[in-house]
Image: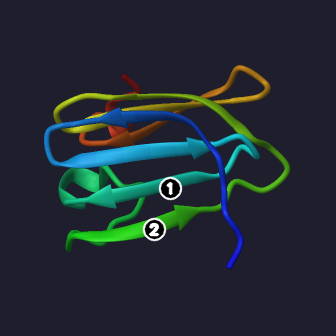
Amino acid sequence: MEYALVLAAACGDQHTLVVTTQGALWTCGEGEHSTLGSTRREARVDALCFFYTKIVSIIASRGHSVVVTEHSTPLHLGQDQKQGR
């Protein structure tokens, strides 16, 4: 088993995001409103893969999360992602 060091964690209403020092993003909790970065709604733990970039910062709120890549690109997850917030 390999271990990863946590760089940051952010908690929303019913979901949590964790980014590792390697730039990997882990999400867990309720998937309602696509807050875990997927259209699946059941509670689970996922590792999200972002090809060719690392995640360096994360923010979580009630039903919306933002992850920021090493290129300063914000990626929106959750209920507001379709509205570009």
Residue 55 position within the rendered picture, expressed as x and y whole percent measured from the top left: 67, 38
For residue 67, which numbered disc appears in the image? Answer: none
Residue at 14%, 39% (x, y): give it.
13
Outermost residue toward the right? Answer: 52
Location of residue 73 with respect to 81 vertically, above or below: above
The amino acid at mark 1 is Trp
Q: Is residue 1 above or below residue 79?
A: below
Question: For the image shown, how many numbered marks are present on the structure?
Answer: 2
**Of 71 and 55, the residue lying toward us:** 55
In what quadrant of the picture does the C terminus appear? top left
Residue plotted at (35% across, 39% down): 82
Other-residue count near label 1 (Cα within 10 Å), few / some / many at <14 / 14–19 / ≥20: some
User: Residue at coordinates 65% horizontally, 61% vertically from top-left?
Assistant: 49
Q: Secondary structure at mark 1?
A: strand
Q: Which residue is mark 2?
A: 46
Q: Is residue 35 left or right of residue 67?
A: left
| Residue reaching furthest to the bottom | 1
- Residue sitting nearer the eye, 17 or 51: 17
At label 2, the amino acid type is: Asp
Task: Return the residue at label 1.
Answer: 26
Give the Cα separation between the discs numbered 1 and 2.
6 Å
Q: Is residue 84 above or below residue 11?
A: above
**Could you tell me residue 72's position as x and y percent?**
71, 20
Q: Secondary structure at mark 2?
A: strand
Judge from the rendering whether residue 62 lies leftward or rightward of residue 39; answer left or right: left
Residue at image coords 80%, 43%: 53
Pointer 1 with pointer 2, Cβ within 8 A: yes
What is the quadrant of the N terminus in the image?
bottom right
Can you give x and y, in whole percent of width and height, for residue 65 in the image?
Answer: 36, 35
Q: Earlier in the sequence, mark 1 or mark 2?
A: 1
| Direction from residue 41 to residue 10 in the image, left or right | right
Q: Check the image and tell me how it is coloured.
A: rainbow
